Amino acid sequence: MKRGWVLALVGANLVAIIALVFAYPHLMISPGSLIPAHAALAENCSSCHAPFRGVPPAKCVSCHAVADIGIRTTNGAAIADASSRPAFHQALITQACLSCHTEHPGASPATREPLFSHDLLNETMRNQCSSCHVPPVDALHADKSAKCATCHTQGGWKPATFDHDRFFPLIGPHKATCATCHTKSDFSTYTCFSCHEHEPGRVQAKHLEEGIRNIDNCVSCHRKGGAEGEGEEGNDD
């Protein structure tokens, strides 16, 4: 008899807990507070969650119309600074919002910031970096003819790889350390005047004889480091 009462008590507690989970999920199983934009939904879990199915994408797009994301608010008002934040959601190949977003930022340190994979973009948008990213304006990136993928991957802007042979082959006397040409650890600029053969006054005088006044960008003419006619073929790549 006693065992029966114990089982009945345990069963009653389980029923009570399950009832509380469904009645007050924000208190019983919530992983943490919501982001400010969704704070008003803190006590209405069913706005986003479906029982035993998590957060179906349909719940998200019922408020956030994909065509309007980044352009208009959920109330239909135009977003003032929309032009400064590219609307790329329209180019996503999936509506699995939780692939990037978490509305409970305190749940886990790993999910406090939105995570984004370029693989979620359609192939056309995926290869148009400037659609979302502002191209750098430093000297290293002045030549926009090279594709971003030449040095960068979609996994992150840094670290980047650089095919030195494509721009200036390090052959012959130019098999030098990076610091020889890129001083002060600044790889966005270079100088050819680190070696005694390239004394600025002598170089200036020699070029003036040919009517060349601007010698600030040696590689624009000497793509392989040689004198005129010495290994300069192939400069149009």
Image: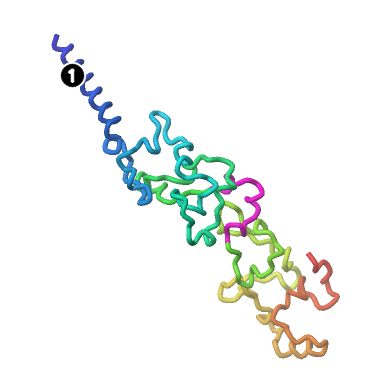
Q: In this picture, is 26 found above or below 172?
A: above
Q: Nearer the viewer, residue 45 or 156?
A: 45
Q: Residue at x 28, y 26 (%)?
A: 18
Q: Closest to the observer: 160 or 178?
A: 160
5 w.r.t. 22: above or below:
above
The residue shown at (63%, 45%) is 122
Q: Residue furthest top?
A: 1
Specify whether residue 122 is painted magenta. Answer: yes
Residue 42 placement: quadrant: top left
| Residue 73 x, y percent position in the rendering | 46, 52
Rendering colour mode: rainbow
Q: Nearer the viewer, residue 139 or 98?
A: 98
- Which residue lies most toward the left here? 2
Percent of width and height locating residue 124: 66, 49
- Percent position (x, y) of residue 106? 34, 47
Give the residue displayed 34% in from the left and 43% down from the top.
41
Is 110 contained in the magenta span? no
Name the residue at the front extreme: 76
Q: Amino acid at mark 1?
A: Leu
Which segment is the magenta one? 117-133
Q: Secondary structure at mark 1?
A: helix
Residue 17 figure quarter? top left
The C terminus lies in which quarter of the figure?
A: bottom right
Residue designated by label 1: 9
Instruction: Name the image quarter holding the N terminus.
Output: top left
Query: Does residue 64 appear left or right of residue 196 in this picture?
Result: left
Residue 226 quadrant: bottom right
